Image: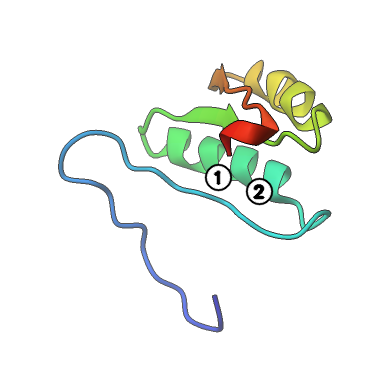
Amino acid sequence: MGGEVSELVYAKFGPTIILLAGLQGVWKTTVSVKLSLYLKKQGKSCRLIAGDVYRPAAVDQLIIFGKQGNRLMCLFMQQDQM
């Protein structure tokens, strides 16, 4: 955050996990898809995981974008599991 740009740091072993968190309506779902497409162009494999219990439409949105060639994992969590 801020005015500086830095490169992504990938995990040496196992998956690199990128968590996007923010207020409602700040384009987290769209940014996650654009980021996954960017990483895919760099030869990385990506999985999109939806865990938003307050906006189930986010899952539907990721399914639509997932058809663009991303692997999609849908994670459904109950509110009491958070």
Q: Residue furthest front?
A: 80
Viewed as shown, does residue 19 lie left or right of 61? left
Residue wearing tag 1: 35
Can residue 51 be seen from the camera position used here?
Answer: no
Quarter placement of the C terminus: top right
Q: Pointer 2: residues within 10 angstroms few (<14), some, or many (20+)?
A: few
User: Viewed as shown, does residue 15 lie left or right of 2?
Assistant: left
Q: Could you tell me the amino acid type at mark 1? A: Leu
Residue 56 in the image, given as x and y percentages of width and height: 79, 28
Name which residue lies at 62% across and 27% down: 77
Image-quadrant location for residue 29: top right
Q: Residue at horizontal 45%, vertical 36%?
A: 41
Please indicate, yes or no, whether residue 8 appears anywhere in the rendered image. Answer: yes
Tell which of 27 and 37 is nearer to you: 27
Q: Secondary structure at mark 1?
A: helix
Q: Are marks 1 and 2 in contact (CB under 8 Å)?
A: yes
Image vertical order of residue 9 relative to residue 59, above or below = below
Measured in 3D between alpha carbons, the distance from the residue under mark 1 to the one under mark 2, in whole angstroms, is 6 Å
> Is 19 displayed left or right of 57 in the figure?
left
Quarter holding the N terminus is bottom right
- Measuring from the top left, give residue 68's x and y in whole percent: 64, 20
Amino acid type for the residue under numbered disc 2: Val
**Model colouring:** rainbow
Residue shown at 73% from the left, 34% from the top: 53
- Give the labeled residue for mark 2: 31
Q: Residue at x 35, y 32 (%)?
A: 43
Q: Quadrant of residue 3?
A: bottom right
